[in-house]
Image: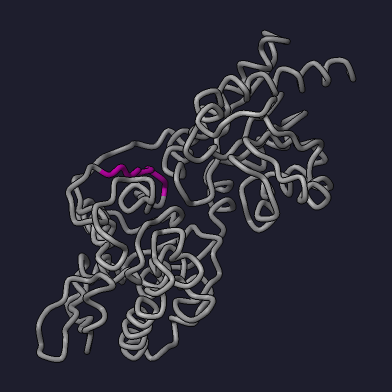
Amino acid sequence: MILLAPDSYKGSLAAIEVAKAMETGIRRVQPDAEVRLMPLADGGEGTLDAVLEATNGNRHELAVTGASYEKLMAGYGLLETPEGLVAILEAAQVVGITLPLSMPVRLRTTQGLGEIIKHCLDLGVRRFMIGLGGSSTNDGGSGLLVALGLKLFDSQGRLLRGNPEDLKHLDYVDFSYLDPRIGESLITIMSDVNNPLCGILGATVVFGPQKGVQEDELAELDESLARFGSCCDAHTGKQISLQAGAGAAGGLGYALQLLGGVSRSGAEVLFELIGFDEAVRQAEWVFTGEGRSDSQTLLGKVAHAVSQVARRYNVPVTLLSGGLDEASLLNLGPHFAGCFSVISKPMTLEEALVGSSSMVANCAEQLMRLWLAKN
């Protein structure tokens, strides 16, 4: 059996589309090949679909507040387990950086993600798995907490909404109105980010620029998060803002840690949910892939996680990626039975995006021909 376990090619193909393209190429050579599709994700964009694809969970949609305070329909999943309902949430569904954004980062909010959590609490859910990758926000998760009942006040006692601009004026917080059902809940944070909330390694400085934060805005936005973190840490009596992962998704990691959430590798959580180890154990060969493979691949990305599982069972795993950093091949090579870019000729980014499915299929086809020749 050939196991097809790619991540998405961000901005081009969803993980299931990559897996189907791989299958197309393989079947051109061996139509009756035993192939299993198991699309993956690491907590970012595509996590919800990957979980539901593998578990037959139910997808739902809810009208919530988007990052720019507009209304949007956001997806979430519900899984029925012996322990009760589990909600699968993906931050990118609500505040994703690829979604339309009409406001600058200083005015964006995570309120909508809190609205989904509250809705799930109303449905009786007390177990949450929340993927944090691909966010466009930098509010420390203050918007999420406000949606769940947290009160933010300025020095005049006026209520604040919960975005970086508001946090500049924050004077004190009141947790007494926080939804008590949160205290009954288990929250798993799916993220590989280990940064603290603030400082030179914090959410704003490290991840802000990719969300549109200008260099001259970094200090002010970081100070807003520091003010928020100081107020909330004082309430808990712990320096949660300094914990690893507090800076994930513009500080969403911090808000969820305040609620008792525990951070875990997104890929590992998904692997457990879908029984990935057993699928690899039964395979003769594994294909994985991602939009671009470089030095970051070995820092908790899906493709590397796949290679680690495959190594435990002595199953070869081959990497097919949209782009391959030549300088990183020396480090990537030992982890895979071949690393390949699906790009076959010089082309523009637009051409690559349009033809990505065909190129994945072509690459998988040629690899299958090599496999058959060897066997």
Q: Residue at x 32, y 82 (%)?
A: 228
Q: Please tell me whether the stretch drawn in magenta is mainly helix, strand or loop.
A: strand
Residue located 46% across and 59% down the image: 210
Q: As drawn, is 167 to the left or to the right of 52?
A: left
Q: Residue furthest right?
A: 374
Tell me residue 345's x, y (percent).
Answer: 68, 25
The location of residue 206, given as percent across then percent down, is 51, 69
Q: Position of residue 166 (x, y in %)?
A: 21, 76
Quarter of the picture containing the N terminus is top right
Q: Which residues are magenta?
A: 74-82
Is residue 81 in the magenta section? yes
Q: Nearer the viewer, residue 209 or 281?
A: 209
Residue 71 spot, x, y in % from top left: 17, 48
Q: Say if 373 sits above or below 186 in the image.
A: above
Q: For residue 197, what is the image quadrant?
A: bottom left
Left or right: residue 288 versus residue 134 is right
| Residue 372 to residue 338: above or below | above
